[in-house]
Image (tube, rainbow, N blue to C red):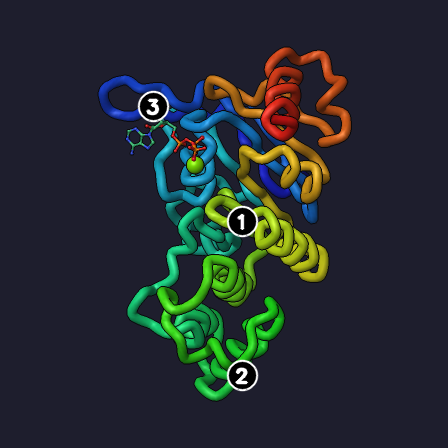
Amino acid sequence: MSKILFDNVKKAFEGGIQVLNGVNLRIEQGESHIILGQSGGGKSVLIRCLLGILDLTDGDIVVDGISVKDSNKKKEYMKKFSILFQGNALFDSMTILENVKFAVSQVNNDKKAVIEIAKEKLHAVGLDDRVFDLYPAEISGGMQKRAALARAISLEPEVLVFDEPTSGLDPITGGIICNLLKGTVQSLGVTAITITHDLRVAEFLADRVSLLNKGVMVWTGSAHDMKDCDNEFAENFYKASNAILVK
Ligand SMILES: Nc1ncnc2c1ncn2[C@@H]1O[C@H](COP(=O)(O)OP(=O)(O)OP(=O)(O)O)[C@@H](O)[C@H]1O
Ligand SMILES: [Mg+2]
């Protein structure tokens, strides 16, 4: 059984905008899967459907045999996931340590242990004690990303979702964060889904890549095979990415 199954997923919004037109995809346990696609193509909508934040118009998403539509198992379903949001989504009024403590306390009732585990998670993502009492606005974008990752892994998820993990970061910091994400996914043995526009991020992180175009997955395969695949959209995406890099 696949870890995650997208079965003919459709999503339309009021006013008739059809964003997802029948997405089919299987993601295996422990896989690092990348979803690539153009801006406005529906990547974030697909993730919000996966997380149960948006209702499906049609089709189904099944994780470990549990349907996203099964309201009796909603809690069990949602507990499997943790997401690193595009904008980090740290609580501005809480310090970095408080942000992570809050997440740890969702899965652990022992107050003393919560503090220790929160510190351990922050150390694991390369943040030291000097930033623990600072607020998100007082630290750099790269550090915020690290803190958001510490919070995400504190929830002990089976599936980690990264939405545009390098957007807004300079290339050097983006590279460091990518390394951190890869190391984290490998050491935890979790299933990971990463959304990106960036082919280099895809090539670095992916076991497999899927391309979302006009609401359907038009190609799935290894990042390496993408440049030689016989799908026109994939080929163009690859060429355009390289053209932008060369300029
Ligand atoms: N709540 C909503 N109501 C109506 N339309 C929406 C809603 N959320 C998203 N959309 C539309 O769905 C389409 C896909 O948006 P989405 O945010 O999933 O794109 P994306 O692929 O994540 O883009 P980006 O790469 O820029 O983040 C867009 O046209 C957007 O306007
Ligand atoms: Mg998006």
State which quarter of the image contains the N terminus. top right
Q: Which residue appears farthest toward the bottom when viewing the image?
A: 112
- Tell which circle, 2 or 1, labels the residue nearer the N-terminal end: 2
**Quick check: marks 2 and 1 in contact, CB under 8 Å?**
no
- The residue at 62%/16% (across/down) is 236
Q: Front-most of 247 and 7? A: 247
Residue 123 position in % (x across, y down): 59, 74
Q: Visible in this render: residue 27?
A: yes
The disc labelled 2 sits on which kind of residue? Glu
Cα–Cα span, label 3 and label 2: 45 Å
Residue 160 position in % (x across, y down): 56, 51
Q: Front-most of 208 and 111? A: 208
- The residue at 43%/23% (across/down) is 20
Q: Which residue appears farthest toward the front when viewing the image?
A: 247
The disc labelled 3 sits on which kind of residue? Ala
From the viewer's perspective, is 244 left or right of 98? right
- Tell which circle, 3 or 2, labels the residue nearer the N-terminal end: 3
Residue 170: which numbered mark, if any?
A: 1
Residues packed near mark 2 inside 10 Å, few (<14), some (14 to 19) or many (20 plus): few
Helix, strand or loop at mark 3: strand
Location of residue 2 (image quadrant): top right
Helix, strand or loop at mark 2: helix
Residue 12: which numbered mark, if any?
A: 3
Whether disc 3's CB lies below 8 Å from ligand 1 is answered no
Where does label 2 land, which residue?
A: 116
Residues packed near mark 3 inside 10 Å, few (<14), some (14 to 19) or many (20 plus): some
Foreground disc of the pair 2, 1: 1
Residue 107: which numbered mark, if any?
A: none
Location of residue 89 (image quadrant): bottom left
The disc labelled 1 sits on which kind of residue? Asp
Q: Is residue 160 above or below residue 2?
A: below
Whether disc 1's CB lies below 8 Å from ligand 1 is answered no
